[in-house]
Amino acid sequence: MREFIVEADGGSRGNPGPAGYGSVVLDAVTGETLVEAAEHIGVASNNVAEYRGLIAGLRAAHALDPTATVRVRMDSKLVVEQMSGRWKIKHPAMQPLATEAAHVFPPGQVTYEWIPREQNKHADRLANEAMDAGKRGERWSASTSTAELDAQTARGRAATVATVSEPSGPPGDVASTSAPAAGPTTASRKAAADIRAAKNVASAGPDLGTPATFVLLRHGETPLTPEKRFSGSGGSDPALSEVGRHQAERVAGALAARGTIQVIVSSPLARCRETAEIVAARLGLRVAVEDGLRESDFGAWEGLTFGEVRERYPDDMNAWLASPEARPTGGGESFEAVAQRVAATRDELVAAYRGRTVLLVTHVTPIKTLVRLALGAPPESLFRMEVSAASLSALAYYADGNATLRLLNDTSHLR
């Protein structure tokens, strides 16, 4: 049975904005490019363009051989996870596209694989060619495309650097052909220096593009905050206090002065939505609500202080402090469950807002969890972070899946 590889990508200059997709069908055995497809699709979001690229690639492969097996490779984790059935498709614009993609080939003939953006250059260049053509009022043409050549050139440069930076023999082999045992010659020292220089170039890493930057804002104070009471998603859902509203106004002013926020996404709980709306009014943006950003459910501990829980439920409290899998009394949410929820939400948001700066208005536990996951820190690190009311933290997520912590618990705007 014949096997194809479909690489696809899509982009939007504005998200939503002028958009296009690119797809390439490769012979899985020889690596030969069999079909290229690209199109400017008008105004659309990144995700819509990515799905359109997937559909075009699958249709092109089907036209070549409807009995073939297909390996789809994309740098869109959202599309890969949704089409693999591991993530739900919530957005109404995505659902019909996913259904259309799923029906090109019979079930079982197509598999999906996420790849870093640097490995999807061919499809990426096709998508950009299509968007450039659309900007000129033209249609993309395969006869004028240089996407394959550009991608091959990029791969060739990467391979050259990798080959030079990793000599085939041990370091001593470089000098042994020309240097006596008494010590290295000038030529051998130069060769060693060249190798070190090449390694420095290689270690600089590829250009991964503009990361998705999440600015994490903990909501302002509620009446429960200064009393240090457990206040999760299973309690009374308190609104902001007067102090909390003042804090939200202060952080709104600070974010307006920075001028970098492009999107606002909030937890569904009242204190976050109120904080987010105050900031949004100042920035002239709308607020999207994401359920995955809600606080942990603290079960029977909701509304109690730490000391009250320790007195009433000592064994459950000790277990909760000792294990991320332990749940609060009464069927609350474990740290492990929160981590899984927050990680899935993070991945969806990173895929949806690549290259953009997004304000996430959320709670203590989700913020600490995002930081912990970004750093690869153990669960006990959650107890070693301070996240104050109305504080700002920031994380950047890159195309290769890595993340960096840029800010933690900044409250300078409240002083």
Image (cartoon, rainbow, N blue to C red):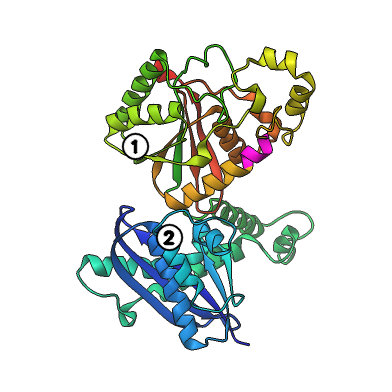
What residue do we see at 61% from left, 60% from top? Answer: 165
Residue 360 image offset from top left, x and y in percent: 45, 36
- Name the amino acid, label 2: Met
What residue do we see at 74% from left, 61% from top? Answer: 170
Q: Is residue 325 above or below residue 117?
A: above
Q: Name the residue carrying label 1.
A: 260
Crowding around mark 2 (Cα neighbors within 10 Å: few <14, some 14 to 19, many 20+) is some
Residue 65 image offset from top left, x and y in percent: 52, 88
Q: Nearer the viewer, residue 73 or 276?
A: 276
Q: Nearer the viewer, residue 140 or 182?
A: 140
Q: Name the residue carrying label 2.
A: 94
What range is drawn magenta here? 334-339
- Whether residue 139 appears in magenta in the rendering, the answer is no
Q: Nearer the viewer, residue 93 or 358?
A: 93
Q: Secondary structure at mark 1?
A: loop
What residue do we see at 41% from left, 18% from top? Answer: 244
What residue do we see at 45% from left, 46% from top? Answer: 212
- Whether residue 338 appears in magenta in the rendering, the answer is yes
Q: CA distance from mark 2 to mark 1?
A: 28 Å
Q: Quadrant of the N terminus?
A: bottom right
